[in-house]
Amino acid sequence: MAKKNQVDKVIASNRKARHDFEILDTYEAGMVLTGTEVKSLREGKASLVDGFGQFYRDELYIENLYIPEYLNGSWTNHAARRRRKLLLHRQELLKIERKISEAGLTVVPLSLYFKDGRAKLEIGVARGKREFDKRQTLREKQDNREAQRAMRERNRRSG
């Protein structure tokens, strides 16, 4: 029997978002999907690259999330880039809405996965990085990698 709260399958992740944005907070949200969207996701097809979150009438929607049409679908097929409602608790919605009312903050999708048979979207409240911030982050990653490599070498020689 499967464990509770186990992530079954990661469908898509937005690595570009972690490069272009400084993620301040993350939330797990359910999504309102049609049947053909779920079938298409089960085939492992989706893209989060252009996606962003936006509030309409006190509810959070994800826009530009690309879920391709289901190949075996009929006239009931969905639009690939339609607006999809995110399912969050009211307190989480209020917290997110307060945060993005600040200048420069936005909601970006980070990963899309199945958890206990339901499609979940990890979203993040993020601030856009400037070019020098991106270079600084890359430099820090490279320095950490070199330090780890040196430690490994030193441990290998001493042991």
Image (cartoon, rainbow, N blue to C red):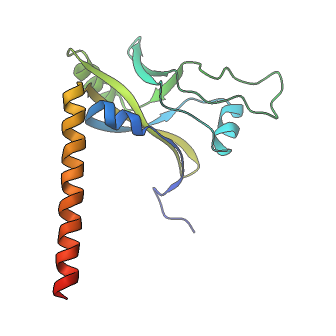
* 126 w.r.t. 9: above or below: above
Relative to residue 9, is residue 54 drawn left or right?
left
Where on the picture, by quarter, is residue 83? top right
- Quadrant of res 8: bottom right
* Residue 153 in picture, x, y percent from top left: 22, 75
Identity of the residue drawn at 29% across and 20% down: 97
For residue 34, above or below residue 28? above
Viewer-side residue, 22 vs 72: 22
In the picture shown, does residue 80 fall above or below 158?
A: above
Q: Position of residue 6 (x, y in %)?
A: 48, 58
x, y percentage for residue 121?
Answer: 46, 37
Q: Quadrant of the C terminus?
A: bottom left
Q: Residue at x 54, y 65 (%)?
A: 2
- Left or right of 22? Residue 89 is right
Residue 144: x percent and y percent?
20, 56
In the image as oriented, which residue stretches furthest toward the bottom?
Answer: 159
Badge count:
0
- 7 left or right of 15? right
Quarter holding the N terminus is: bottom right
Residue pictured at 49% horizontal, 64% vertical: 3
Residue nearest the viewer, comparing 144 with 15: 144
Q: Nearer the viewer, residue 88 or 128?
A: 128
Left/right of residue 111 with respect to residue 154 in the rendered view: right
Q: Residue furthest top?
A: 57
- Frontmost residue, 57 versus 16: 16
